[in-house]
Amino acid sequence: MEGQGWLRGARPWLLAGAGLLVVLVGVELKPRSVEATVHHRRSNDAPYWVGRLEAPAFVDGSFFRQVLENSYASPPLPFPDRTPPFRVTLRLQLVAPTDGIYQFEVDTEWSTALDVNGERVLGSHPFRPGTGRAGEVELAAGTHELVVLSQPMDEIEAPLRLLWRVPGGPLRPVTAENLFDPRRPRSHALGASVSTWLVGVGALGLGLGILSWVVGVSGAGGRREAVAATVLLASFSFVVWGTHSNTYPRMNGDEVHNAWAGFNLIHEGTPRTWSYLPGYVKTFTPWFSYEYPLVEGAYDHPPLLPILIGAEATLLGAATMWDATLPRIRPLMILIGVASVVLLFFLARELAGFQVAFLAATILATSPLTVYNGRLAKEDCLVQLLLLLGIFLYLRNRDRRSTAMDWTVGVIGGLAAVTKVMGLAVGIGIALASIAESPREWGRPARILTMTFLIGSLYPIFGLMMDADTYLRVMGHLSSTYPLESLVDKFSILPRLILDPRISANTPLIDGWILLGWLSLYRLLKEPAVTVPFVSYLLVLVATVLSSSVWGFYIAPVLPFLALSAALQVKHTLKHQEFVAIFLFIGLFFLPSAAHLSGLATLGGFRGVLLMSCIPLLPPLMSLPSDHTISRINRVVLTAMLLIAVFANASEILSRF
């Protein structure tokens, strides 16, 4: 009996381990049969970058420009003043099944040519002679070398696909199954057909194993469960957040600002960077096709994050500010994002138990909106971590009444203030939460606020000591500009943040996790320690930004709490067979998330997925009790939808290019 108990407890881990093994095998077998080279338009002999793709296609050509920016070293090599006139060359071995006339076509806005066995088959300007974007060639059965030459014209973000028509067949894209990889012919043939299925089946087994373990943990769980959850969440989020972090989202101008300011402050003693704000003496300097208005010292942002990024870039080999490219400034942000995922787990564990905490952390780790914005070398991401840490320490100290912990929470609030001005809301919000919980006890909020403003004052002290005249001019401009908007403009900011979420600055993205979180916020209302800082930050944000400049990363500090409210709603949906709860879960969570899985189209397209997703709505419409057999089956179906949504969001991030 004792042996059977051990086996029963080990089953989730055995299933999860087997699933992970299958995932790793699928990833290893995934074909990489197309050699992609980025080089100068005039020369194929000096490649800037060489990589491998699964098929002769890409979804966003700006990936290659980002590669160039990231591998850029320092002036004057290879191109200090402008984005290089680059070309992308794809080399592949195509397997022709029969003898005959084969037709080829390229689907892209880029100028493109195709050579088959050294013969030009098609080509658009400047790749002439050619026949435009389509052509045909006679091929014998067997393997043939194809070379796709492509370079951007006006639309650098355009995708590209190579299509072909075999004799007597339809026009369709060239996929990995049509190619031959001489480096590993056996594994390529196998991987081209089964790698996607292996990853999917393995991910399902991994998810089921972890889910069965999480369901078996009662209450807040013990220390062993907390350690295991920390390892799982940290490992998972590190993989998800780190994949393609150097190429997506594209380099943001504010990231350049922070990196240059921090690097120069450390090495030159002044935060030299770029800024458009009046009050600075500017020198326009070209870098990657963009004219940056360089200033000798920028003081419109607090210095904490620039100092951290400058130190990180230095440790990772940057010799000048031009070397502070994404591979040298985003690793710190990945670690901050992973720490935020783990912190959310411990915070939610204090409030709602182990199961909700694990789900909330999983949502934060796999939400495309949180991951893409969390990778940016932006102050908002550090404020997110400090806000979570401050609330967590406050919750741990709520009953202990330690004055030392109050001062520590105040220090965290102060650090948030010297990270970004809106970070003042961290200390203020936690202090207001303590007043809401204990209206007659003023010692705790006084200590928190005192330390918050004491450390926050380091920002103006820093500016006044570095360059008082410039600092006062810039602060005068900011203070006179932001409050002058009408109340209508100010109140329009919050609905836009909810209804028009964006990646980085202004790339739209509807995220089912976050949308469900906004509509489930009422589930957090009973907890002032979370609700008051959440509302405080939103109010400070609305008060301090212009309605004409509402960027996507502004909302990053509150995204963990939306993940928590979404997790609470999911638990309620699984536990209670209510029509509204299931409708919110499916319509605002599952369907937007499942849209990231192109494979679902094989089930009948969007209409088929929509029809199947409506089936779980039937039991609550029939008013079946929760212990009814159909209701139990319904709970299994909703759980499967949850696993699919997790997998869909993670795969969207992991396979961005």
Image (cartoon, grey):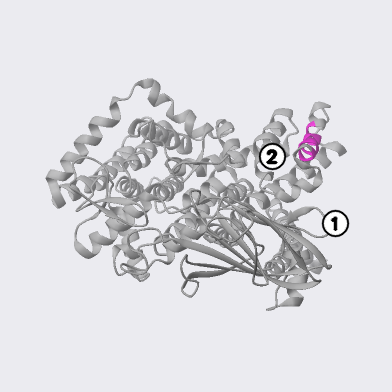
Q: For the point 48% across and 31% down, which residue is it?
A: 496
Q: Main secondary structure of the magenta part?
A: helix
**Residue 246 visible, this orientation:** no
Q: Quadrant of residue 82?
A: bottom left
What are the residue bounds of the magenta stretch? 608-617
Closer to us: 339 or 496: 496
Q: Which mark is residue 168?
A: 1
Q: Quadrant of residue 102?
A: bottom right
Q: Residues within 10 Å of mark 1 (few under 14, many from 20)?
A: few
Spot occupied by residue 319 in the image (x, y as percentages of width and height): 30, 70
User: What's the residue type where badge 2 is placed?
Assistant: Leu
Closer to us: 311 or 116: 116
Does 516 appear above or below 107?
A: above
Does 420 appear above or below 631?
A: below
Q: For the point 39% across and 24% down, which residue is it?
A: 489
Spot occupied by residue 402 in the image (x, y as percentages of width and height): 37, 48
Spot occupied by residue 143 in the image (x, y as percentages of width and height): 75, 73
Disc nearest the viewer among 2 and 1? 1
> In this figure, which residue is indicated by the disc labeled 2?
591
Residue closest to the far bottom: 183
Residue 508 is covered by the magenta coloring: no
User: What's the residue type where badge 1 is placed?
Assistant: Gly
Q: For the point 40% across and 34% down, which residue is it?
A: 536
Residue closest to the far right: 629
Upstream in the sequence, badge 2 or badge 1?
Answer: 1
